[in-house]
Image: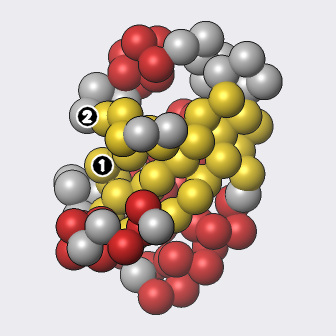
Amino acid sequence: MHVISRSRIVEFCKTYPEAYEPLDRWYRITCDAEWDNFAELRIAFGSADKVGPYVVFNIGGNKYRLVAEIFFTHKVALIRAILTHGEYDDDDWKG
């Protein structure tokens, strides 16, 4: 998968440096993946959930959420947001 964009991870980690390792792990796994559908994605990330057009990944023991659009036919993962658990629960990211 082609991940767009790693810079979102870097920016988030400036504020939350402890998130770097789990986000980097997500990035490496996703870059190496060639998922054809959500079921294949769930093999790698069992706690991933579909929320509307997005896939929400639990990161760092559920401390963070990474919200992405996954375009399986084009092999692209577009990061829409990286949030703390509290920010995710506010639902402002859906707007």
The residue that mark 1 highlights is 58
Q: Which of 38/18 is in front?
A: 38
Q: In this figure, which colouring scheme has been used for the structure?
A: secondary structure
Q: Quadrant of the N terminus?
A: top right
Q: Amino acid at mark 2?
A: Ser
User: Residue at left 28%, top 26%?
Assistant: 46
In the rendered structure, are the residues bearing label 2 and label 1 in contact, judged by CB atoms less than 8 Å apart? Answer: yes
Can you give x and y, in whole percent of width and height, for residue 87 in the image? 30, 75
Judged left or right of residue 1, residue 80 is left
Between the residue at mark 2 and the residue at mark 1, the CA separation in whole angstroms equals 7 Å
Q: Is residue 71 left or right of residue 42?
A: right
Looking at the image, residue 14 lies above or below residue 2: below
Image spot of residue 20 (x, y percent): 47, 67
32 is higher (above) or lower (below) than 86 = above
Residue at 29% in and 57% down: 60
For this orientation, the residue located farthest to the front is 95
x and y percentages locating residue 56 in the rendered image? 38, 45
Residue, disc 2: 47
